[in-house]
Image: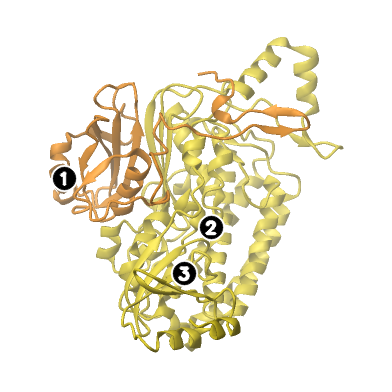
Amino acid sequence: MSQSQSTQSDPYATTRDTTEGKVFTVTGQDWDAVVAGLGDEPEERIVVNMGPQHPSTHGVLRLILEIEGETVTEARCGIGYLHTGIEKNMEFRSWVQGVTFCTRMDYLSPFYNEAAYCLAVERLLGIEDQIPEKANVMRVLLMELNRISSHLVAIATGGMEIGALTVMTIGFREREMTLDLFELITGLRMNHAFIRPGGVSQDLPPGALDKIREYITWMNKHLPEYAELCNANPIFKSRLQNVGYLDLAGCMALGISGPPLRATGYAMDLRKTQPYCGYETYDFDVPTWDTSDSYGRFRVRLEEMHESLRIVEQCTDRLAKMEGEPVMVADKKIGWPSQLAVGSDGMGNSLDHIKHIMGESMEALIHHFKLVTEGFRVPAGQAYVALESPRGELGCHLVSDGGTKPYRAHFRDPSFANLQAMPIMCEGAQVADVIVAVASLDPVMGGVDR
Amino acid sequence: MSAAPATPPATAACAARSHLVEVCQHLRDDEALRFEFCSGVSGVHYPNETDRELHAVYHLLSITHNRRIRLEVSVPDSDPHIPSVVSVYPANDWHERETWDFFGIIFDGHPALTRIQMPDDWPGHPQRKDYPLGGIDVEYKGAVIPPPDTRRSYN
C-alpha cells in the first residue's frame, strides 16, 4: 500500500506482504480498502482469520475460513487461547481445593464442573450412597438453575449475533434473576466452589425457598416471551433453519452430545439413561426436535428451560420438608469440620466451632488442622464420571495414587468435543451462517481450553 | 501403582497397542458390544512404571446397551507410539491431539497430529510429571507464599 493510502486509512487496519501472500488486517467498515488493495493482483483464494478477538466467536475462539466470495469452502478452529492449566494445577492441591479450580473451566455452568468432579471423588472414596439426601436435592436444584442460566446466555448471545437485540436484553434480564439466586445460596454469582466432595458446603440460607418460589413465578411468566419473540419470527427462522446441519450419524461419529444431538430427534440424556444425584426420582421430559439444524437446537434449549423449571419446582417442595437436615457426609474424616456463617465483621466464621477447637478439645483442633491443611486421602484407583451439562456429556476422569491430591484430573468438556463439528457444519455455507452454526453449538472457551 | 483397578460400575480393559484399532473396531461394531460413542482419550504419566510410563485411557459409551468401558493402553516413554483410532472414532481427533500436546504420546495415523492447546512452538509436554508447574512467590502483607509445587507437601 502506498504512503498516501495508509495515512488516510485506519492505523490499525494495515497491509503487509508475506511469503504466503498479502495480509490485510480488517477491523470493520474498511472492506473497500481491502478490495482496492486486491485490485491489481486479484487473488481467488482468500483465507479469513476470524478471531480470536472477534465479538461473535463466543470468547477467544479463532476460526480460520477459506472463502470464495461469500461461500466458506474450508473452515478450521484454532483453540488454546484460554488454556490455563487447570488440570495440571489440580495435581498440586488437595481434593477439596480441586473444586475451586474446576469450577472456573466452563464459566457458564460452574455447578456442573463441580458436580462432575465431586461425583468422581465420591466414587473413588466409595461414599456415593452416603451423600445426604438434602445435599443431592440442593445439587440438583443448583444444576437445573444453572442449566436455565446457561441456556439463557446461549439464546441471548446467539440472538444478539444475528441482530435480535431484544432476545439478548431479556435473556440477560432473566439470567440476572438466576445469578441473584446463586449469590443468595452460595455467596457468589460464578466460581462458587459450593459443591464439595461429600455434599455441599453450606445449608440453604433463611428465606431462600421463598426467593426460589418468586423466581419460579417470574420465570413461568417470562419464559414464554422467548417463544413468542422467536419461534415463528420469519427473520429468526430464515437465519436459523437449515443452517449448521448435523444429523444423528454425524453426531455419533464426532462424539457430539447435548442439544445438538437431541435436535436430531434422539432423546439421549444422561439424566435419564445413567441417573446421578437422584435424577430418577424427578418428573421431567427430554425435549427433542427433528430438524438437525440451528433452529432445532434453539427449540431444544427453549424447551429444556421449561423442564428445568419443573425440576427446580420439585426440588423446592422437597427442600421445604428437609429443614435442618445435614448437607455434608457424616464421615468426619471427609466432611469439612465447620459450618461457616457470615459474622458481624462480614467474614466467614463459625464462632461455636472456634470456641470448640480453641477452648475445649485439643483433638478437635488437631483434626481440624489435619483435614484443612493436609486434606483427606482417597484410595488408589481411577474413575470416569459423566453427567449431562447444558452442553452435553461432561466427563471427569480422576486418577488417585492414594494420596491427598489427585494424581491426574482430566475433564472431557462437551464444548471441546462439540466444537469438532464446526467444519462439517460450516463448509459450503455462507460466512454469515458460520456465526449461527457456532452459536448453535454454544461453545464456552473456558471449558474448551481448560 | 498397578494398572487400572476397576471401579464399579464401569468396566475396565487393557489392550496391547498393536491390537488397539482392531479392539476398538470390534467394540464399536459387535452387536453385543456396540460402543458407539467415544468420550475421548486422556493421558496419564507414571514415571515410576518402567517401560510403561505413558498410559492412554479411552472412555467408551454404549448407548444401545447403556454401558461404559474404560480401555487402557500403556507404552514406554522411549517409544511413545500408539495407533490412532480416529478411523474408528472420528470423535477422538481433538482428544488425541490434546494427549499428544500434554503427554507427548504420538498417535500414528492421526490425520493432523499437531499441538492443540499450547502454542505450536512450545517446548515439552506440560502435563507430564517431570514437567514443572512453575510459578513465583507471592507476597501478601509482608508474608511470602511460595508457588504451590514448592510448598510443604504431605504426600
* A242 and A315: which is toward the camera: A242
Q: In the current view of this chain or complex, which residue is farthest to the right?
A: A344
| Location of mark 2 (residue) | A147
Give the numbered dot on residue A281.
none
User: What is the x, y in percent for residue B94?
Assistant: 33, 53
Q: Residue at x 38, y 65 (%)?
A: A260
> The residue under label 1 is which amino acid type?
Val
Mark 3 and mark 2 in contact? Answer it, CB < 8 Å: no
Q: Residue at x 39, y 49 (%)?
A: B121
Classed neighbour count for the residue bearing mark 2: other residues with Cα under 10 Å, few (<14), some (14–19), many (≥20): many
Residue B46 vs A65, above or below: the answer is above
Tell me, what colour scheme is on the image?
by chain
Colour chain A appears in: yellow
| Location of mark 1 (residue) | B21
| Location of mark 3 (residue) | A439
User: What is the x, y in percent for residue A404?
Assistant: 51, 23
> The residue under label 2 is which amino acid type?
Arg
Q: Quadrant of residue A311?
A: bottom right
Which is more foreground, mark 3 or mark 2?
3
For label 2, the SS is helix
3D distance between C-alphas at marks 1 and 2: 37 Å
Mark 1 and mark 2 in contact? Answer it, CB < 8 Å: no
For label 1, the SS is helix
> The residue under label 3 is which amino acid type?
Ala
Chain letter for the part of the structure drawn in orange: B
Horizontal side, residue B57 vs residue A286: left or right: left
User: What is the x, y in percent for residue A93?
Assistant: 55, 30
